[in-house]
Amino acid sequence: MKNKLLILIPFLSLFTSCSDDITGLNADTKRPTYTEANYLFTNAEHAMVDQITSTSVNYNVFRLFSQQWTEVQYPQESQYDLTGRKIPDTHWTVLYRDVLRDYKESKDILLKQKQNFTGSASEAKVLNNKIAIIDILSAYTYSILVDTFGDIPYTEALDIINFPQPKYDDAQTIYKDLISKLKTASNTLDQNYGSFGDADLVYGGNASNWAKFANSLRLRLSINLDDVDHAYASAQVLSAISDGIFTSSSDNTYMNYSSTQPNANPLYVDLVASGRNDFVPANTFVNKLNTLSDPRRAKYFTEFTPGTYIGGVYGELNVYDNFSHITETVKAPEYPGVLLTYSEIQFLLAEAVERGIAVGGTAESHYNTAITSSMSDWGVSSSDITTYLSRTDVAYSTATGNWKRKIGEQAWIALYNRGFEAWTSYRRLDFPVLNVPTVTYGDITEVPKRYSYPGAEETLNSTNLSSAVSKLGSNSVVKHIFWDKF
Amino acid sequence: MKLKLNGFLVLLLALMTQITFAQERAVSGLVSDNAGLPLPGVSVLIKGTKVGTQTDFDGKYTIKVAPSQTLVFSYIGMKSQEVKASSNTVNVKLISGAIELEGTVVTSLGVKREKKSLGYATQELKGGDLKSGTSSGNFLNELSGKVAGVNITRNTNFGGSTSAVSRGIKAINQSNEMLIVIDGMPINNSNTSIDGTTSQTTGRQGFDYGNNGMDINPEDIESINVLKGAAASALYGYQAGNGVLMITTKKGKAKKGMGITVSSEVVTGTIDKSTFVNYQKQYGAGYGASFDSHNNVAFGDDASAGDVFNPSLNVFQWDAYAAYPGNNNYGKATPWVAAKNDPTTFFKNSLSLINSISFEDGNDKTNVVFNYTNTKQSGILPNSDLAKNNFSLKLNHQFTDKLSLSTFANFSNQNTIGRNMTGYGDNMVTGFRQWWQTNVDIKQLEEAYNASGEQNITWNRTSASDGTPAYWNNPYFERYKNYQNDSRNRFVGYANLTYKINDWLSATAKISTDTYSELREERVAAGSVGKTFGINGLNETSGYQRYNGNFSEQNYDFILNFKKNIGDNISINATAGGTAKRNVFDAITASTQGGLIVPGLYSLSNSVQGSPYPYERATKNGVNSYYASASIGYLDTYFVEATSRRDAFSNLPSGSNTLFSNSVSGSWVFSKNINLNWLSFGKLRGGYSESPLGTPGLALIDTYSKIDAFNGNQQYSVNSIKNNPFLQPIKTKTQEIGLEMQFLKKRIGFDLSLYKNVNDGEAVNVPYSTSTGNSARYVNAATIENKGIEVQFNATPYKSDDFSWDVTINWSKNKNMVTALAPGIDNLQISSFPGSVTLNAVVGQPFGVLKGTDYTYYTDGQRIVSRTTGRYVINTSTNNIIGNVNPDWIGGIRNKFNYKNLSFSFLIDMKKGGDVFSTDQWYGVGTGLTSETVGNNDLGNPIRNSAASGGGVIFPGVYADGTPNTTRTDYFRPAAGAITNSYSGGARKGYIYDAGFVKLREVSLSYTLPSTLVAKMKLTDMKVSLVGSNLWIIHKNLPDADPESGLSSNSGSLGLSIGSLPTTRNIGCNLTIKF
């Protein structure tokens, strides 16, 4: 009878493999544990330009804050509701997690290669160039974060193992560190060698272009700093210029998008592919251009009736069909994302002259070059440019107001479609005069001067956040960040 | 007394001695079943001997037996009976096996135990109790209100998922669902609605694909034993800490007649209007103005915050520009009035047909049941159909006295078309509830769709000259063209071989398998409004996406069962065994991109841009376990049980992937010691137990995410979740005590349990500040405590031969508390809902607090209003706690009346408290849709008129100094385009509602035809029932929606009411005939 137990043998055999050593089952067979530095770099650069280019109300509302555009049926963001869609959280997360973290990973891989380096001397140069470019773009990204929020995590950022709750560093200290990093990186770049090649979507790996970008960005950051530390700012401006800044529009920092999604310009995605009509040019902006009969109107907006341009009332409900629209140029899928232009640098140089920094030239000459460069970038004919510059309300000597107003208004016009820079220029110069909508979120009564810190920081990093907030006074959007003294 | 007893014993002894010497003689008789039908093949054995016989075809037997001896009549599926062979004719009626189960329950691994010996709470439900309302196609729905301590959360999604959580939410990332076990075999009940590209459970657009446990055919269920605590399920270990639903399938009985049962149910449902929008009928389209200068309606404005209706005003509505045959309004201005047919009329009656046939037979060696059930359902939305076929076979066979085999196989096939889209985004019910024009007539849209040859003619034109939809498709086009479909084929089965080594030891080997494959297809028809779609979530105006998924799980068990009595007083029950569990899941999602080349062809090759990289997932998971348990009983009064198990997990780091968990419990049947007339039964029980908790797979080693290439340049990204190679195994610890008492011959009684459960250190992907470069990191972090009380109460207030009235009450209260998260982290966001309300685990709070903006309050609790604006002063921090999703208590009361062959029962199901955020109200009030947005103010003027002209409102509240608010303010602000104190200028707190309810859940009236009448019809049994479910929401606080109608069974979607279908009142008729 007992031999019947043998029936159970096939079942028992199943248990011969029943040991503890089954952890091999838990292997990810679909995602890699290794990748190339170039691939991470491309992704980070792409995400960075997307974030600064986008007009999605979930990502980037700077075109609204600078009152170049306004909304149609859903004006909440134009009325400064940042929390409804957690815009500060998204901006913060994209820049830290999707941009800076991938730059860091890319750099870590390169540093590891450098440590165990076996290649040729020229390959070593390329490696160094790559690391320098990552440093430059990381500095750029951090500068956007500081300019948006003020104090931010910096020295303890991007290291979840050692600093799960990174402290907030002083914004001015960060700024100076960024400036010094930009200088080091631009000096490191060897312009006789390449870098990322095509994996660099902006300059195709051209080290010379990146050096100019680094110095031009250093100029921009230094001008921002001028009100709080004039001596330091002047020295850095002069050093940046001597290291080589943009000299023409051909230096402009563009990233050309692809004709199809998911690599099309995010503006195309929101304005065309979405099938939605959420935005129209704002009256604040259009009216100013109308007053000046600015030839860029036809480049920026569609005509409402032949020869007339009408902007939607900023921060109010608008009917899409009752206003001018955004031009097809800007809506094209391939339309480039823009980080920095020669025109912008020339406005900064005009400012530098007015701020008493010996950059050479006159405020007027830089002002004229800036406008000319902006107009030719947009395809305005040179005769129209000449006519425009000679208008008494445009010409530097005769235009209304102090230098801040003259430069502020023209820079604002030239920085069309570059909401973040236009808003930053406005914050620094306090011009143009912008309108506060009749309805605002939380009934605030002025144009925001910063983003409030992300809501998630309140719960995930509350101790560090609260010391940053107490330094600022409150987490309100109307608080000025450190360089915005006036 | 003692003396008398002794005398009696002496007498008995004397009698027995006499009888023993009596002569054997032939005894004969007839064995029949309860209905009086003869039972062939019944084993008739002389007790204590191996002498026996069987009944013949007519149920008759003859056996030689002495009058002193006892005959044992046994038959599979029937309760055995012992009868003294004192007379020459012994006729026996055997009672069916369901009653055999009385007093015994099926515990872990399918082991039957006497209920009185258990040191933990169990509650049994018979198949008949499950089916006392209309069938919904998901047996979990039918548990609602019937089991103490089990919180059933169902929703109104077509073919949607239902959650069953016992004794509170215990885990943050792991499933909280009770484990479903069929005859000892675990069944996959996962909810796979998250397909990697959308996040359906947090209120983004998606589909609820149901919980996989719904594949179980209710027709197969004999009974469900609910094991609530970890102690009850200690032997299942991993997965079982949430409690277990032990399903016992029907087994074959000796056939009566042909042994065929046919049952048929027809159910129709009509919408409960209290669960859908009550539209205002005074104002029409727009965010402010309804018309442009040409008297065109603001087609593009998906709101009803426009101009007041005026029948004498003629305007150009959408149909004035829509060219379709038979459109009499084309080119015409028509009166400005509210639509005759609002979206309520979009819903049709639902219909469900369930037909089943089963064949059964059995004798002393073999029993068999085969069942086929066909389910056809059509939902309340046009073009929604679900068809399901279930085939099941259960076969038990006794090869020898010692060797027996038990097998079960179930194949099911489900095909669904047109599930309702859930959440925000392009869900048209969200459109009806939040973004609609009250001047638009739904029937006219149907006419436009049909008359135009099924074109997307929408009310929501981009402009007068441009008929492409601004945000919303024609709802009929949406339903008939942009439908999804899915199908699932599933096989569940086991084979169980048991060898009785001797009287007290048996060995069982078992293989069980659960495997399914699924296909899901989604479409966007050419001509649709752009929507987020496809692998890359791009905005697409046409497209196709498919998902193929395969799951399979095998369990290999080897079990030794030991059962022995030592002397008369001690009984031992012991089990030792091992299980190897292996499961594999792989899935692939692929889509078109950039639109479809040929409209209407739904194929990946029809992609304008070529398909993007498909999204693949593959996981394997294994657990190897050894366990032992022993239960010792003394005097049938004192019982103690201990279990121990060791598990090795594949998901943990090698070297630290094993865990021991132990439990001990005991019970004392004190009614055996205390002899009181009125006390029929009394038991005290208590225990401590541990149960291992799972760890997510692929959480140890970091990997990179692939992103589509940019102009040929590959793109990779660091994963947003940081993995952790140092994860540890963890367990749930439970303490439980209980008291069970029955009085007055069990006419009245209760079963009370108190428990405390701690889940200590669950591996959770803890969110960190994204300035760390990651969104989250896996950490053994979260500790959640649940404490609670459960009561089952039963009473039979009246009982006579003909009439009985039974009452059953279930009530439970659970208190949940998050006691720890990761170091430095006191808030863990579970979900972020549309409308920016978040669901969180917060240290010191219950799991599932809702956070969002709040009002500001004066010391007396009144809301503070700004003296200048007249509007509430808002606390704009998103970190305010504004709600808690956990109900205060849940309960159900069932009344059952039996009068002769007639039976009537009804169930009232209740939930008290628990909060829900209504995104529908947040926006639906804001856009002026709901009836609460109209009316007159204290001055008798319409509230929507401007405050300056005597309209507006004075919001209840006080100024900052505590004096009452007297500032009149606009109720509707044209500059905001929305009603004040909604999404415009309101606080989320204002749209948090108490989700409690009282519902008449089930009503059933059934009539069993008298056997004489049935016999005349040549049938053996016939029963007719009228059943109803969800007939009446007696009480609720959430306006315009069912507080139960969530998104999904996933606990991440708790506390959100958005875009759900209205609830249906279901009435049906059920007929069961046995041949």
Image (cartoon, rainbow, N blue to C red):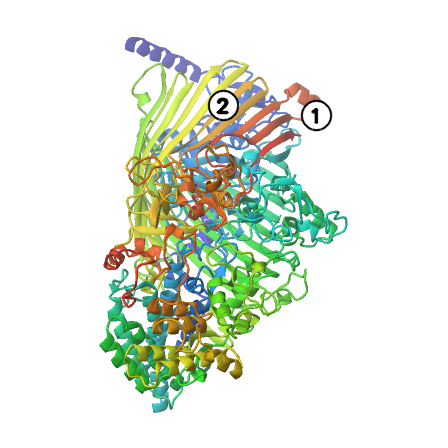
Q: Depth check: B98 or B68 in front?
A: B98
Tag 2 subunit:
B
Whether residue A199 is visible to the viewer of this picture, yes or no, is: no
Q: Is residue B153 above or below residue A410?
A: above
- How far across and how far down the image is residue A405, in percent? 37, 70
Does residue B294 appear left or right of residue B839 in this picture?
A: right
Q: Mark 1 vs mark 2: which is more N-terminal?
A: 2
Q: Tag 2: residue type?
A: Asn
Q: Residues within 10 Å of mark 2 (few under 14, many from 20)?
A: some
Residue A17 seen in this snapshot: yes
Q: Looking at the image, is B560 positioned above or below residue B477?
A: above
Q: Badge 2 is on which residue? A: B895
Q: Nearer the viewer, mark 1 or mark 2?
A: 2
Q: Chain of mark 1?
A: B
Q: Observer-nearest residue: B826 or B990?
A: B990
* Residue holding disc 1: B1018
Q: Position of residue B53 (x, y in %)?
A: 55, 28
How far apart marks 1 and 2 lie (CA) works out to 34 Å
Could you say which is closer to the camera, residue B509 or residue A253? A253
* Residue kind at label 1, given as amino acid type: Lys
Element assignment for label 2: strand
